[in-house]
Image (cartoon, helix red, strand yellow):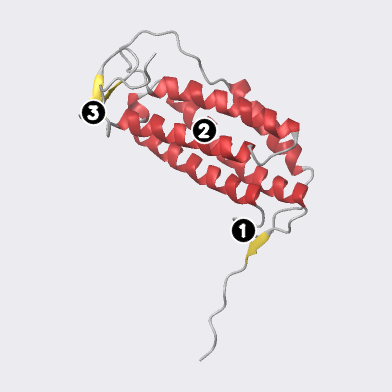
Amino acid sequence: MKIYTKGGDKGSTSLFGGQRVSKDHWQIEAYGTVDELNSTLGLLASYISEKKVDKEILQIQHDLFDIGSLLATPLDVDFQLPEISEDTIANLESSIDNMNTHLPILKHFILPGGAKSVAIAHICRTVCRRAERRVVAVKDEIRSPEMIIKYLNRLSDYLFVLSRYLGHLSGVEERKWIPQKEEKK
């Protein structure tokens, strides 16, 4: 099977169901950003040795493929599609709560960095926020918008706490943002 079809050589691509749209169409932008997030999570997973966290990231990657399928399917196409449920979101919340039990109380804003895994987790978080903005912008035109937005919002929270947790596991001190005071003239 050839991977290239040449169908997109003139700047269009197909949605689920066969409808052709421009590659800058809102659906392509939304699910493309979710795909970018999935790829950055794959990079992050390559730096993680804790099996529980690796398993969580793998599940999140599956969830993001489910979201991508919802975003890539026009509303008028009748496909059996996976759904994002309250249980899926509750699993993220449980993981957040579990990681938080190992972390000091947050008293400052945290700067990204300190260890590769921490920095990559922050990149994942910011890509997740962008994906959320893309979905919010088109919420009236997609399937399950409330659940997708809720999931992406919770996922960005998860990724923030994960960045702190990975720093904790690595023994890396958090890089706190301390506002710079203006020098008196």
Which dot marks residue 160?
none
The residue that appears at 25% across and 21% down in the rendered structure is 7
The local crowd at label 2, few if under 14, some if 14 to 19, many if 20 or more residues have their Cα within 10 Å, is many
Which residue is denoted by mark 3 in the rendering?
Answer: 9
Q: Nearer the viewer, mark 1 or mark 3?
A: 3
Which residue is denoted by mark 2 in the rendering?
Answer: 38
The residue that appears at 46% across and 27% down in the rendered structure is 146
* Residue 103 appears in the rendering: no
Which residue is denoted by mark 1 in the rendering?
Answer: 109
Q: Residue furthest bottom?
A: 185
Label 1 is placed on what type of residue? Phe
Distance from Cα at disc 1 to Cα at disc 2: 26 Å
Q: Nearer the viewer, residue 51 or 56?
A: 51
The local crowd at label 3, few if under 14, some if 14 to 19, many if 20 or more residues have their Cα within 10 Å, is few
Check disc 2 and report its element: helix, strand or loop: helix
Q: Nearer the viewer, mark 3 or mark 2?
A: 3
Residue 41: name its quadrant.
top right
- Relative image position of residue 50 (x, y in whole percent): 75, 36
Check disc 3 and report its element: helix, strand or loop: loop
The local crowd at label 1, few if under 14, some if 14 to 19, many if 20 or more residues have their Cα within 10 Å, is few
User: In this picture, is 3 found above or below 158?
Assistant: above
Distance from Cα at disc 1 to Cα at disc 3: 45 Å
Q: Is residue 137 left or right of residue 92?
A: left
Mark 1 vs 3: CB contact within 8 A: no
Label 3 is placed on what type of residue? Asp
Q: Is residue 53 left or right of residue 13?
A: right
Disc with the residue nearer the chain's start (1 vs 2): 2
Label 2 is placed on what type of residue? Asn
